[in-house]
Image (cartoon, coloured by chain):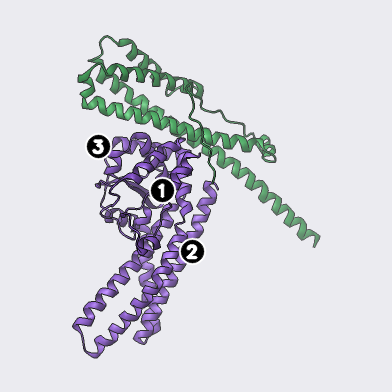
Chain colours: A green, B purple
Amino acid sequence: MVATWIIIVIVAVVLFFMYIYNSLIRLRMRVKNAWSQIDVQLKRRYDLIPNLVSAVKGYMKHEKGVLEEVTKARTALISGSMKDKAKASNQVTDALKSIFAVAENYPQLKANENFKQLQEELSGTESKIAYARQFYNDSVMQYNESVQVFPKNIFAKLFSFSQEEFFKTEGKEKENVKVEF
Amino acid sequence: MGFYEEIASNKRRTYFLVFFFFLFVIGLGLMIGVLYGNSYFGLILALVIGVLYFLFSYYGGANAILSMTGAQEATKPQYTTLINTVEGLAIAAGLPSVPKVYVIDDSALNAFATGRDPEHAAVTVTTGLLEKLNKLELEGVLAHEISHIKNFDIRVMLLASVMVGLTVLLSDFLLRSFLFGARGRDDREGGSITVVFIVVGLVLAILSPIIGELMKLAISRKREFLADASGAMLTRYPKGLADALRKIKDDPDPLVDKANRATAHLFISTPFRKTKGTFTNLFSTHPDITERIKRLEGM
């Protein structure tokens, strides 16, 4: 009788450990996936920029500086740490903004189909980066929370689940909404 | 309530719907069997047809709905903005894959999502919606649809469509055969078939309101509020959807030409003209739009 009880308790404890361990793994996997979503979009942007530069070069002879800036920031999009990437992404966003602002002065460029398509794609990529960042930061928040709360924090220490970094931008973050059901 | 509770409750609803569907089919089969003097034959026939119908609608229902509503797949470069927005929201919601994007050529302002799970899903908007909403409003509507996909609402709605579709189809079929049968036949055999049709038609007439109630149960008003709220969490901008809903509400011609009873509840706003008949009340699948706007603005 006692032996049965001991077995039951052991099985329950093992199941409980498994559950906690798996939930931590799942959350960490989600953070990883979310990060790769950002990476995909940064890469897409990296690929699109040369096309934009070559489409624009012929028109913008006097604004070489802007083009150089965006080309320089571009390389950092796919290399370096998360912080570097976040910084590069902000720089590219600013540089693109000024390119599109300058383009307003060139009606011929603005009418160019290729340019219009690129502009659409790049602004699409930009909002996708914002969305991917949002999902990433949400995932990180959930993961970090579970790493810190009792009793999961014990497991987290034991199996070295460390906290993850948020993907920060310099601009104002979109505020989360209060939702009540 | 979070996404996970909502998904779990939707899966329960799905089993419930499937259970009632088969109960309905078995009942119908037994009845036909008894009337023809062989209840096993009717039962087996009904089960075979029921299983086939169920499998077909589970795996092919979304495509059937899309072609029924006249939806065409959206392609770049014409719909680049639309496709990009859907992709972005799918990323924000953490969907396993990007839903397919479709467009209905209709001036009404409406949209719906369908599919059997987030891996096999589609978002559809009318061209009227694309013309009359700005980017933020469109984003709000699409976020609402993406939430339906993430919550597995689409699966419940798909199966509900299928059930209502079958009842509508059967009652139409029986009514028509009864009318034509009554006119053309006066021999004894024809007489007994007519009796079958009358009885089945009567039963369907009794069952229809019950099925209507079941539909309401499955497609609770809460679902739309929930999708509004989760959509707002995706865009972080509830005003976008609120403004869109206001435009949809003020739209003078909400009729989507190819919408019907079976697909109506899929849409973000009811695709029929605003009438106050008993039929519309019975199948009133959408909560009051003003109430939805109010809740969104309170976030």
Q: Tag 2: residue type?
A: Phe
**Position of A140 relative to A19 (above/below):** above
Where residue A3 appears, x then y in whole percent?
Answer: 78, 59
The residue under the point 40% across, 72% down is B207
Q: CA distance from mark 3 to mark 1?
A: 31 Å
Q: Quadrant of residue B33?
A: bottom left
Q: CA distance from mark 2 to mark 1?
A: 28 Å
Badge 1 marks a residue whose secondary structure is helix
- The Cα atoms of the two marked residues, 2 and 3, are separated by 42 Å
Q: Is residue B195 left or right of residue A21?
A: left
Closer to us: B35 or B239: B239
Q: Nearer the viewer, residue A160 or B107?
A: B107
Which label sits on residue B289? 1
Q: Indicate the quadrant containing the N terminus of chain A: top left, top right, bottom left or bottom right.
A: bottom right
| Residue located at (29% from left, 56% from top) | B259
Q: Chain of mark 3?
A: B
Secondary structure under badge 2? helix
Residue ranking furthest to the right = A2
- Front residue (pair B12, B267): B267
Q: Say which residue label 3 marks.
A: B78
Q: Is residue B216 left or right of residue A152?
A: left
The residue at 47%/48% (across/down) is B225
Q: Residue furthest bottom?
A: B188
Is B73 left, or right, of B222 in this rendering? left
x 73%, y 52%: residue: A10
Q: Which mark is residue A159?
A: none
Q: To which chain does the residue with label 2 belong?
A: B
Asked if labels 3 and 1 share a chain, the reply is yes
Residue B293 picture location, percent across and down: 44, 43
From this viewpoint, is residue B150 visible? no
Residue labelled with disc 2: B16
Q: Amino acid at mark 3?
A: Gln
